Structure formats: C-alpha cells, structure tokens
Image (cartoon, helix red, strand yellow):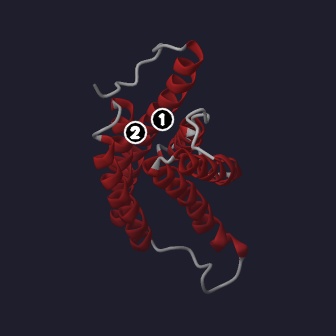
Amino acid sequence: MSQSDNFANPAPLGLMGFGMTTILLNIHNAGFFPISAMILAMGLCYGGAAQIIAGILEFKKGNTFGLTAFTSYGFFWISLVALLLFPQMGTEGVTQATPHAFMACYLLMWGIFTAFMFIATLRGSRASQLVFGTLTILFFLLAIGDYTGSELIIQIAGYEGILCGAIAIYSAMAQVINEQYGRTVLPLGEPK
C-alpha cells in the first residue's frame, strides 16, 4: 500500500493545544490569577494529550519535526502537571515539592531542546520561527526566574508566554482557514 498525501494536517490541533494552554499558564505567571485546576486540566487534556495525538499523526505523515515537537511538548505538559500535583498528594519521598533550583534545571533543559528545535524552523515559515523563538526565550526566562526567585522575571516571562501562545494560535488558525479557502487568507511567512 502506498503512502497517501491526502492525510489531514494535524499541526493546527497541536498548535492550538500548545497555544491555548501556554496562554492560560502564562496569564498565571503574569500575575493575573493563581494556578488552578483549570490550568492543570488544560495541561493534561489539551496541552498534553492533544499534542501527543498530533505528534503521532505527524509520524504517519512522515514529519519528523512535527512528531518530535508535538509529542515532546505534549509530554512536557503532562510532566509539568505531575510536578505540580505530586506534592499535593500528601506522601513524602518522590512527591516532595521540587526545589526552585531543580525546577530551573528542568526549564533550562526544555529551553535547550527548544533552541535546537528553533534552529530547525529556520527552514520553515516565519510563524514557526516566531513560535519557537519566543518559546525558547520563555523557557530561559522561566529558568532564570525560578533560579533567582525573581517574581519580576516570572511576570515578564508570563507576558512573553502570552505572546508565544497567541502566535501559536494564529499559526493554527491560519493553517485551518487557508486550507478551507484554498488560498492564503492569513499569511504564515512561508519560505520561498
């Protein structure tokens, strides 16, 4: 059986899961409201599960970048929710709250991963470059904020994360709308 090019594009699903969840978490980081079950549920269900599904579908399309990005960030959201929930479960040991310096290492590793993914976007659309560029900055700001304990840096990261999530949502909707209309309605800055 031959590979068909008529598969649906899973990227908008992954980008929406990422974008909406990123905005909600970063509205918290910017200081607008405390972390709540709403953010954690979005992290598990849409930021996590939907992105993993999108990544698996990218595998079917033969898109290594999409597979790596969506499944990785899907599992990022699930691991972040686990990091936040495990200490609330009331037992000692592995469920102790993560010290800020350790959380900074976690965020730093995600920043390094994202910086490499950003390099891969340099052959892609401007929208992808903006998503991964702002996400790289976001992870590094959050790592610095956790390491130093600076609420100001976390708040700045929150605003930057809202921008990152908004760009991802724009990219998702541009892909859906452009496909539906069969032409470029919302530009993505595709490479020439």
Tell me if label 2 and label 1 are in contact, CB under 8 Å: yes
Q: Quadrant of the C terminus?
A: top left
Q: Amino acid at mark 2?
A: Val
Q: How many marks?
A: 2
Q: Residue at x 36, y 59 (%)?
A: 113
* Residue in front for this viewpoint, 188 or 79: 188
- Report helix, strand or loop for mark 2: helix
Q: Is residue 150 left or right of residue 40?
A: left
Relative to 129, is 88 above or below?
below
Specify whether residue 149 is in view: no
The circle drawn on residue 131 is 2
Question: Which numbered dot is residue 90?
Answer: none
Label 2 crowding class (10 Å Cα cut-off): few <14, some 14-19, many 20+?
Answer: many
Label 1: which residue?
Answer: 168
Task: Point out the residue furthest to the front here.
Answer: 1
**Above or below: residue 82 compared with residue 58:** below
Q: Residue at x 56, y 74 (%)?
A: 97
How crowded is the residue under tag 1: few (<14 C-alpha within 10 Å), some, or many (20+)?
A: many
Place of residue 71 in the rendered image (x, y in percent of width and height, measured from the top left):
54, 55
Residue 49: x and y in percent read 66, 52
Quarter of the rendering containing residue 140: bottom left
* Element on which disc 1 rests: helix
Residue type, numbered disc 1: Ala
Image coordinates for residue 25, horizontal then vertical, percent: 55, 47
Q: Disc 2 and disc 1: Cα gap in Å? A: 6 Å
Observer able to see residue 136: yes
Q: Position of residue 87 (x, y in %)?
A: 63, 73
Q: Is residue 65 left or right of residue 169?
A: left
Q: Nearer the viewer, residue 123 or 170?
A: 123
